[in-house]
Amino acid sequence: MDDFIIALAGNPNVGKSTVFNALTGMKQHTGNWAGKTVSCAEGCFDYKDRHFILADIPGIYSLFANSAEEQTAHDFICSGRAFGAVVVCDASCLERNLNLALQIIDKIPRTVICVNLIDEAEKKGISVDAQKLSGLLGVPVVLTSARNNKGLDELCETINNIVDCKPVPLKLNLNGNDDEIISSISQKASEIAAQTVTYNSPEPYKRDRRLDKIFMNRKTGIPVMLLLFGLIMWITVTGANYPSELLSKGLFALGDIMSQGLLASGLPSWIEGVLIQGIYKVLAWVVSVMLPPMAIFFPMFTLLEDFGYLPRIAFNLDGCFRCSGACGKQAITMSMGLGCNACGVTGCRIIDSPRERLIAIITNSFMLCNGRFPTVIAVITMFFVTVGGIFGSVISGAVLLGVIILGVFMTLAVSFALSQTVLKGESSSYTLELPPYRRPQICKVLVRSLLDRTIFVLGRACTASIPCGLIIWLLANIKAGDVSLLAHISDFLDPLGSLMGLDGVILLAFILGFPANEIVVPIILMSYMAQGSLVEMSDNTELWAVLVANGWTIKTALCMLIFTVFHFPCATTCMTIKKETGSWKWTLISFALPTAIGMFLCIIVNLFG
């Protein structure tokens, strides 16, 4: 069976990845910002005894390379690897999409035009004459709504047909310099669109413009953004408590059963200690503390993405980032960091400028990630909120939002400092398409956020926690002079901890929590209570009593909050930084910079608090 390589191309936000997923069955994430896909993803499908390999190239606007995405697409289209091409266009803005379609038709004659999102276009009163469009372009045209699986069978049939029937595409005769060619293509796209697109409504984009007057207004844009994220934080704080408690009790009860089984089998107690008291308890704690907030936060964040709101955040904050010498797209990667800093670092690929991309990578850990939520929430609840019930949870959510805003301000400040020193340069210009507002596909969002984000991040955290659990158990159970190594190290760190308004136990907990931030508090409890394994304590009142008995005050809690927000990234994020930058130098800077800032702020608070 011969393989036919088909290039799948299109502008950002036209549903290209949805078409790719529908045809190949692969779960390629569909994002709502330009450049979400930065490398070619390949999938395959069989149709009528033929095997097609579909190459999903980056979403771009032109083959005239100005960015990494355009260069990747240009190289693939012009390489001669592709037998044919499918260009996905948005039915509601066909004229703009035809610019890229004409360029690809000129390079690959066997091209199929997939006019997607016809359902959204119909709601706006926009219709496309597929037959006339096909005649003007000289290539087949198929109308689809990929998210509803409409027109995909016809698309497969058309792709199969171009193997036997060579299309006769429109000859553009592109001569001259790049500006002249671009101008000629734009004029041709405008002429074709004028003949094939019909507007049955005088104001097809009325709804989008009404919403933009709220979400992108100078007076209301940022307040609405803060309100939305505040609501998400409140729901996360309130909703995660009960399932976390149930999960913790269930996992620790299972651990007790496994412990009894190992001991009853006659195995040495140290093996049970390593496997259950060390590795398993750390894993159980990470899962019970990390999973519920992620399972709540990621779907809500993905709903905002699916709705088309995230690029509006970049638009609203673009001025702030430009003043700091960075890029407005950093607002998107910063928002991704709220879920996981490693995901935020990976998302920095959407920033074209290498300098601005590096700034975004270095400063991403200033955003409070999901792994640090439980610690911050616990400290806020115990030391800064004096009322319970719904009012207490509202106040907790508000304080948590305030902590996140502090991280945003520090991100801007450090971005400015970097752009004026080691990463000096002017802010670059960029194109950011604002996608239309779309009704989120709730079921797909839940599955995608669970599989692509929650399980993925949790899996990496659990992998990093296994060696951490072993090390913690060894330090807590190996003694020197009747005192555990854990106690010796914490005593050594105590002078520095006291200077920072903390103590040696807290500093050691942060160091040992490098693989996973979720275990910082249980390590603190284990050390204070001189236990040989992590201690389960879901009651905040009981936890507060232990902390106060070991010298915690409001000032200690404040310094704890500061250092939780501003300290070295976790192991997973550091590995991601090394992979993205290819440099140990920038990885070490990303590690040291937030730590130094956190230590400095803690010392200032301790001395003048």
Image (tube, rainbow, N blue to C red):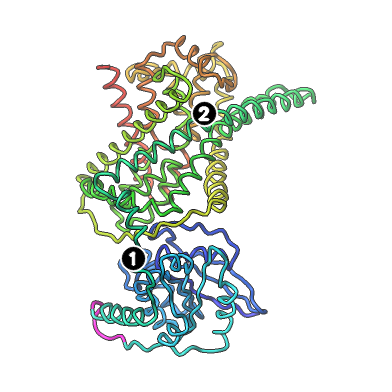
First reached walking from the N terminus: tag 1 or tag 2: 1
Instruction: Relative to 521, say whether 229 is above or below.
Output: below
Q: Residues within 10 Å of mark 2 (few under 14, many from 20)?
A: many
In this picture, which residue range is highlighted in magenta?
A: 174-179
Toward the right, the furthest residue is 265
As measured in the structure, the alpha-carbon distance from the residue carrying label 1 to the one carrying label 2 is 55 Å
Q: Is residue 358 visible?
A: no
Please tell me whether mark 2 sits on a helix, a strand or a loop.
Answer: helix
Question: Where's residue 407, x and y in %?
Answer: 33, 36
Please tell me whether mark 1 sits on a helix, a strand or a loop.
Answer: loop
Instruction: Relative to 120, say whether 453 is above or below.
Output: above
Label 1–label 2 contact, CB within 8 A? no
Instruction: Relative to 503, say whether 236 is above or below.
Output: below
Using the rendered view, name the quadrant where residue 263 is placed: top right
| 105, 260: nearer the viewer | 105
**Dot 2 amino acid type:** Ile
Label disc, if present, on residue 568 of the rendered structure: none
| 182, 500: nearer the viewer | 182
Q: Disc 2 designates what residue? A: 519
- Left-right relation of 275 to 534: right
Using the rendered view, name the quadrant where residue 350 is placed: bottom left
Q: Disc 1 designates what residue? A: 203
Residue 521 colored in magenta in the image:
no
Question: Where's residue 330, x and y in %?
Answer: 33, 49
Q: Is residue 563 visible?
A: yes
**Dot 1 amino acid type:** Glu
